Each structure stands twice: as structure tokens, then as C-alpha cells.
Image: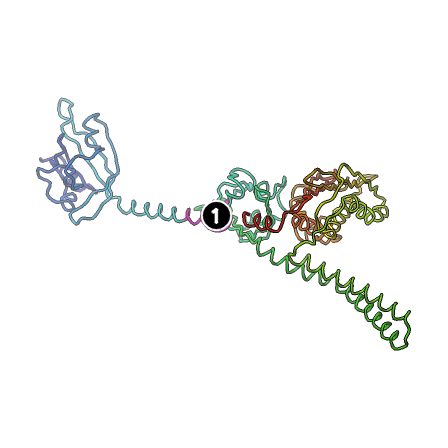
Amino acid sequence: MQLPYQSYFESVPGYLTVQNKRLEIVAANRRFIEDFGDFDGRYCYQVYKQRPEKCEVCPVIQTFRDGQRHTSTERVTNLQGERVSVIVYTRPVKGEKGDIEAVIEHSTDITEIMDLQDQLRESQAKYRLLFEEVPCYISIQDENLRIVDANRSFREDFGASYGSKCYEVYKHRKEECVPCVLRQTFQDGKLYSHEEVVTCRSGRKKNVLVHTAPIRDASGEIVSVMEMSADITRIRELQDQLTSIGLLISSISHGLKGLLNGLDGGIYLVNSGMDKDNPERLKKGWGIVLRNVSRIRSMVMDILYYAKDRDPDWQKISVEALYDEVWDMVERKASDQSINLLSEPLDSDGHFEADHKAIRTMLVNLIENSIDACRLDKKKDEHTVRFGHRGDADIVIFEIEDNGIGMDRETREKAFSLFFSSKGMEGTGLGLFISNKIAQSHNGNVLVESEPGVGTKFTVALPRIQPSEERREESDCSD
């Protein structure tokens, strides 16, 4: 078939064919013949795809049906057996009466483009897999600090909080953190790192090491920032344990020195009493020795208790007796600070199993914390700390409530962390940490309710009867 403008037909940069209604190729340009060979008497699907039947979706057939132009993307095979990607365009060839006599099919080789797209999709899939499975929290945030994407670890622990601000999700704050390393990255495009304490949606607190990196568009402008947070909670727990050992040893070293000096003095009296056959001198010296040995033993036990896990010294304790003992220990301090200490014992008679010294220390710590919170509050004329207890057949509950400075949500969530203190330089950050550790060792808990400027309430719940050793081991295994 000789077409008008045959030279133009031959020079088109692509594959050109003319097909009849039976999809027979009746004409083709030189480029087509070079790459696909002789077409005489053959159907397009035989030449292009080496298949025995028509394609399920054929743009040529569609053009014969409706007279419209159609397009599609296809994979064809040339003479060398190479797979070639083409984009196909069709248009009708009409006769004098307006009926469609043939269809021109123009196919352009887009193999390189398709290969690049495949490589891009493969790279995106690898990036997404890395993004999802990397063992740290990753979030991408816009210039308003709103989370626009997050990986699987982040979603599992903090939820799919798309559109929420990072400080709302991580720290339950109402205002932006200061300083904010992510904001700094937006401003200067530099990488930053910072350590934070964050709270999962389960309420569990975690120490994380945060790294930020800018994400830029084609023009180099920073459009978002990636925040990568590695969970270093276990490392910090180990470091805290080592630090607490050093801190405790340092804090009592001076006391131990004094006790040893007293022990030397007692030993001197014992020896001189024996040498001079002075029973009174001997008795006095031996009493000093016994007292100092007892105090040294007590200090060593404290170190062992706080510096490492140990089994509590279980005893059957009277609730009323313990309550009165703690009251006597804190009443003087409250009075010296001009703080009203109110006793509110409720229906909680009887006994419970506990380590007497540990529980006494815990309650004293909590009450002294409330006294300090009242002392630091300069906005009220009068301050009160209420100390009460209640319970039932299964648990005993101690309550300490004050109208001091109070705590916001972020402070409440960090209150039981080692060395965290809301008192600035006045606090050691040990009291609440130790109190919580004691409650947990007794299979109990300490709950804190607090509002800034209103006050704080601590509720200590302890079981009256501790599980047997066998039941405790079973419980540990089930956890």
C-alpha cells in the first residue's frame, strides 16, 4: 500500500503501522521493519508480542469501534528478543464515505523511561522498607512541627498521630519545647542531637536520643525535617543504677567516717577498761561499740537496698502503729515550716505484710515532698498537708495530699525518674524515685494526681498479704 507523504511516514521517530479491521499490518515504516522484521500477512499481536490471539485490551480495536484516538502503554518484543516498552497512540483513517478503513498506530520507545520508573519504584520500596523497619522512632514534621509521616515503631508506641504537633504526642505539652532541635534544623539546615524523656501512649516513659536532619525540595529549600529517636532507656537505667551507687556511697561516706571514729573511741574505752579492771568503763565502751556497729550495719543495708534489687524483709505490720510512727517523724518538720499537718485515719485497721523500714521510708519521703511543695508555694497564705489511710480486706491505702505548687502533666510523668526534681538545686531527685521503687517491690503502686497551683495527691496502694515465693515466681514468668 503506497501512502501519501510516504517520506514523512518513513521518517517518523518511532514505530508506525497501518492496520485493517482484522488487525493485519498493511503498512509499516522503516524503523518498524528494522526492529520487528517482515510484516506481510501477519497480525500486529503476532509481530509485536509473539502471541497467537488478540490482546485483551487493544487500542486499535477501540478506535475501529468509536472512531476516537486512544493510547496505552505496552511491552513488545523485537527481533533480538529484547523487551521494549512503548507508548501507543492510534487514530482512524477514514474513506470517502466517512467509514473507518484503517487505523494508524504510532508507538514510541519509552524503555529507558520505564526502566527509570522501575528503578524509582524499587528505590522507593527499599526506602519505605528501611523507613518502616529501622529499629528507632522516625517522624517527619513540617515547619509547624506537625507530624506528616511516621514509621511503624513510632505508630505502635505513640499512635498514628498525623497532623498533631510533636510535643503534644511525645510529651503531652501544650507549648513548644525550649530549646527545640527540630526548629533549629528548620532555621539553619544543620544536624542536631538531643536527649529527651518521652511518654508512650501506654504511659510508659522512655529515654530517647533524638537526631534531626533536613529534607529539601529540588530548589534546596527545607520543606520538612526528619526526627530519628533511638530508645536508650535500658542504657540510662544501667547508668542510673551505677550513678545511684556512687551517689549513695558518697552521701554516706562522711557519716561512716564519723561512725568509725566513734567505734574507735568505744574500742579504746573497752581496752582501757580491761587494762584497768574498770567494769563501768568497759560497759560504757562496749555500749558505744554496739551502737556504732548497729548504725554501720543499718547504713550498709540501705546501700544494698537502694543500689541493687533485694528481697524485702517481710513482717506483719500494724497499720495504726506504722501510721503513728511516721506521723511522729514528720510532725516536727511540718511545724518548723508553719505547715498544718492534718491526720485523717479512716477505716483501715489491722495488719499487712511489708518491709517495715522500707515502707516507713517511702511514706516519710512522700510527706516531706508535700511539705517542700508547700514551702515553695509563695501564692497561698496557708498550707496544709493531709496524711490518712484507708483500705479493705485486700489492700491498705495511704494518702498524702497537699495544696502546694502542684505539677503539670510533663512533670507528673517524670516525677518518679531518678534524679528528676522540680525543686531545682534544692532537690536530689532521689525521694520519689526511691518511694516508687519501694512500692513496686511490695507489688503495689504510687499514683500521683496534681495540677499546677492547686496541689498534689499521692495514693499508695499495697496488698495486705504478699504472694508466696512460688506465686511470685509464677507471676514473674507470666510477665
Q: Is residue 104 left or right of residue 189?
A: left
Amino acid marked by disc 1: Ile
- Seen at 71% across and 48% down, the residue is 422
Q: Of 18 and 319, which appears nearest the observer?
A: 319
The reply to whether the magenta stretch includes residue 365 is no
Find the residue positioned furthest to the top. 97
Image location (x, y in percent) of residue 328: 83, 48
Find the residue positioned furthest to the bottom. 275
Q: Is residue 212 left or right of residue 336?
A: left
Residue stretch in magenta: 127-140
Q: Of 99 and 255, which appears nearest the observer?
A: 255
The residue where tag 1 is placed is: 215
Q: Label 1: how many residues lie within 10 Å, few (<14), some (14-19) or many (20+)?
A: some
Q: Of 124 and 208, which appears nearest the observer?
A: 208
Image location (x, y in percent) of residue 230: 53, 52
Image location (x, y in percent) of residue 327: 81, 46
Which quadrant of the figure contains the N terminus?
top left
Classify 377 as above or below 243.
above
The reply to whether the magenta stretch includes residue 132 is yes
Q: Of 64 and 6, which appears nearest the observer?
A: 64
